Amino acid sequence: MKLIAAADYRDMSKKAAGIFLKQMEQKRQSVLGLATGGTVKGVYSELVELFLEGKISFAEAASFNLDEYFGMKKEDPNSYFSYMQEQFFSHTDFAGESNYIPDGTAADPIDECSRYDRLIEQSGGVDLQLLGIGENGHIGFNEPGTSFEIGTHLVGLTESTRQANARYFEVMEQVPKEAITMGIGTIMKSRKIVLLASGGKKAAAIEQLWYGKVTEDFPASVLKLHPDATIIADEEALSGV
Ligand code: GLP
């Protein structure tokens, strides 16, 4: 696992966007694994800027998002579908059908999970996976205790994760209790992984990730077993390292 120190949020976002730029220069048909949350917004705006400057194109690329709230319609402003359209997809040249996100309204979620894993496999697999990190070390929505082997699956969200995400909703009752997420097994198949962390709230998680042991109780620790995983964290997130 490599660690890149960034000065601040902007620097972290620029450094991550630089890795995406390099990836797209090397392979125009790259399959990108994408994440949601506050941390990664800056990367998307940097990538949109690079696109507007004519320095990057996604016309031949495909993307797979990590997760989606279960029971949430695409059109809901809090869906990860809406987030991705707003932050990234609608401002770029991705081809219409090339952005995949788990279907939060699937009648049979188990079926939707295996369909999603099959689609990833058929695409040739994820070349570059972007990740944020939860304060409890979760990646995607893989909460502490999740098996490292598992593929895309339906999960119950912990109270702490619901509370961390409550800021996007009007009232706590609106925060979904379940989500469909790529599993850790799915994430680990990506050829390259970049995990971002910004701000003091993530300092304890980054400290544990860097110094702690590999354990299913701290999902992000699995990245230590990946041949090409990089953390990019800003000064505040790195205060314990
Ligand atoms: C959610 C997402 C994760 C993300 C995490 C951290 O739980 N499912 O993919 O990493 O939030 O979000 P933020 O970057 O807003 O702190």
Image (spheres, rainbow, N blue to C red):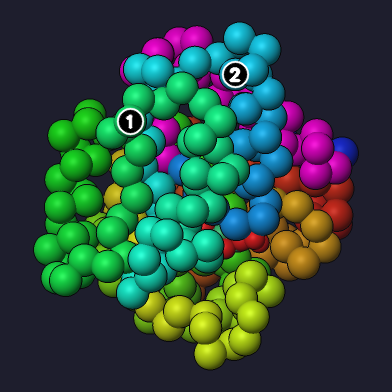
Q: Is residue 74 left or right of residue 241?
A: left
Q: Main secondary structure of the magenta part?
A: helix
Q: Residues within 10 Å of mark 2 (few under 14, many from 20)?
A: some
The circle on residue 231 is none
| Residue 88 falls within the magenta-colored stretch | no
Query: Where is residue 79 drawn, in percent x and y?
Result: 46, 62
**How far across and down, in percent of the image, does residue 116 sit?**
22, 51
**Pointer 2 or 1: first along the chain:** 2
Secondary structure of the residue carrying numbered label 1: loop
Q: Nearer the viewer, mark 2 or mark 1?
A: 1
Does any atom of ligand 1 lie closer than 8 Å to the CB of label 1?
Answer: no
Residue, disc 2: 51
Q: What residue range appears in magenta?
A: 8-33
Does the magenta run of residues contain 21?
A: yes
> Could you tell me the amino acid type at mark 2?
Phe
Above or below for 227 versus 188:
above
Relative to 49, does residue 131 appear above or below in the rendering? below
Task: Work out which residue is located at the far bottom of the displayed protein and give it.
Answer: 173
Q: Is residue 182 visible?
A: yes
93 sits to left or right of 86? left
Q: Which residue is mark 1?
A: 96
Q: Quadrant of residue 157?
A: bottom left
Which residue is pictured at 56% across the width and 45% down the height?
A: 86
What residue do we see at 33% from left, 74% from top? Answer: 71
